[in-house]
Amino acid sequence: MRTLIHNATVVDENASETKSVVIADDKISDIIGKENDNQIDINAFDEVIDASGMVLLPGVIDDHVHFREPGLTQKADIESESRAAAAGGVTSYMDMPNTKPHATTLPLLENKFKLAEQKSRVNYSFYYGATNDNIDSIASLDPTTVCGVKVFMGSSTGGMLVDKESSLRQLFAASPLLIMAHCEDTGIINDNIKHFKKKYKGQNDFPVRYHSRIRNTDACFASSSLAVRLAKETGARLHVAHISTAKELSLFSPGQVDNKKITAEAVIPHLMFTNEDYDLLGTKIKCNPAIKSVDDRNALRQALADKVIDIVATDHAPHLAEEKKGGALNAMSGMPSIQFSLVSMLNLVDEGVITMQDVVRLMCHNPARLFRIDRRGFIKEGFYADLVLVKKDRPWVLTNDMILSKCKWSPFEGSAFNWKVARTIVNGETVFSEHGLNDNVRGKSLAFNA
């Protein structure tokens, strides 16, 4: 099968040029500059995609999702959320281990790979979950097939909370894989809850706007600084998930991701919302770590351009609508966002916050570099044809019927976007176009260069 994407504006982190891209089976076989366009024989291809007026990007690689399978499939599952990913231009994802049961043994991890092989519309990998008791098994993980080890250093997730410094040090010293850390200090959070309960005479819940004062800057910084210190002392490869505060940015250095052993991720909720949005959106934007102040959000946005933040992901975490009822303590934390992450970032381009090249660096190139993904994340000859065509159109407003996530709600409902995903290609096959989803496509397990 030979496909020609004709006359696209091809964007990478350094340039934006009109080119045509040839796909042979599952890989990019040729990239043809505009100066050689008259040499293209249209009849030599099985499919020709006229991309005039469109922008061609590498497929987005989302290093932080919760697709809820197995065990929590009333909220979401691999099939439903990978369909939403495809519609959003996401061609690869890395799923977290806090499913039911937790992916904290090798057989349970392998089961998730088998489920994805059958169900996932886009490419996939899965984190192994660290506990206080399974650190010895981490040494037996295959670094060419498993994306990393996830450690929850706070924000209790049952048996997956690892908050003993001795256990953390052992983990950081032993892991042959990149460690992704959720950093919030449980002791500080619990003390804040006690303070609010005393202030409000034993109430068991509070308005959601207090969420950012319970899971506050101090809780985030204390845990992130511990993780960074342990990584420096042990030489571990550390990736700190969902940085939410300006103060934490002081822990990280600007520069190219290839030259770093300690890196930082920002996620869509903290880049798009502030604690001023609680009054309008309520628990729809309740997540852990909490949405913080306007100043925190603006600092995170600046850190994208300054190359202090290395990756933008989603922390896509669907819950049923009824599970979001309550306040700062009782409503579940997390929101779906994978279908609208790319168009949200492109809105920031239109606002002058970042450039299109920044989007590609943060959502495509850098995830591939950091996780050492084999032949993905770039538009290069010999690389897998994971691609997304986007086009700028008249502004459109998100309505409920457009949402593909199984939970069927989004904090972005009612928001206006300037860009649309016109086509998503995974391993050379169109999985999504403006005509709809192709449910015959299946993604592949990501491979990593150890």
Image: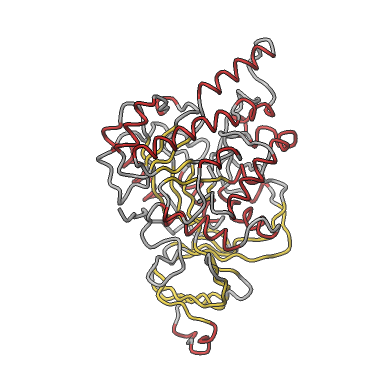
At which x and y percent is residue 405? 56, 45
Seen at 60% across and 33% down, the residue is: 290
Does residue 426 sit above or below 23 in this rendering? above
Q: Is residue 434 or residue 250 the one in the foreground? A: 250
Give above or below for 413 relative to 394: above
- Give the camera-side residue of 7 and 409: 7
Residue with the most extreme top position? 201
Q: Left or right of 270: which side holds 131?
A: left
Q: Identify which residue is drawn at 35% across, 31% down.
A: 169
Q: Quadrant of residue 26?
A: bottom left
Residue 359, percent from left and from top? 57, 58
The percent position of residue 232, horizontal first and vertical second, equals: 39, 40
Residue 396 at x, y percent in the picture: 72, 57
Instruction: Please identify the quadrant where the N terminus is shown.
Output: bottom left
The structure residue drawn at horizontal position 42% and vertical position 76%, both measured from the top left corner, is 2
* Display coloring: secondary structure
For this orientation, the residue located farthest to the bottom is: 38
Q: How many marks?
A: 0
Compare residues 72 and 265 and report the one nearer the observer: 265
Is residue 229 something one can see in this rendering?
Answer: yes
Which of 235 and 323 lies nearest the eye of the viewer?
235
Left or right relative to 76: residue 101 = left
Q: Is residue 411 left or right of residue 146?
A: right
Would you say residue 325 is visible in this rendering? no
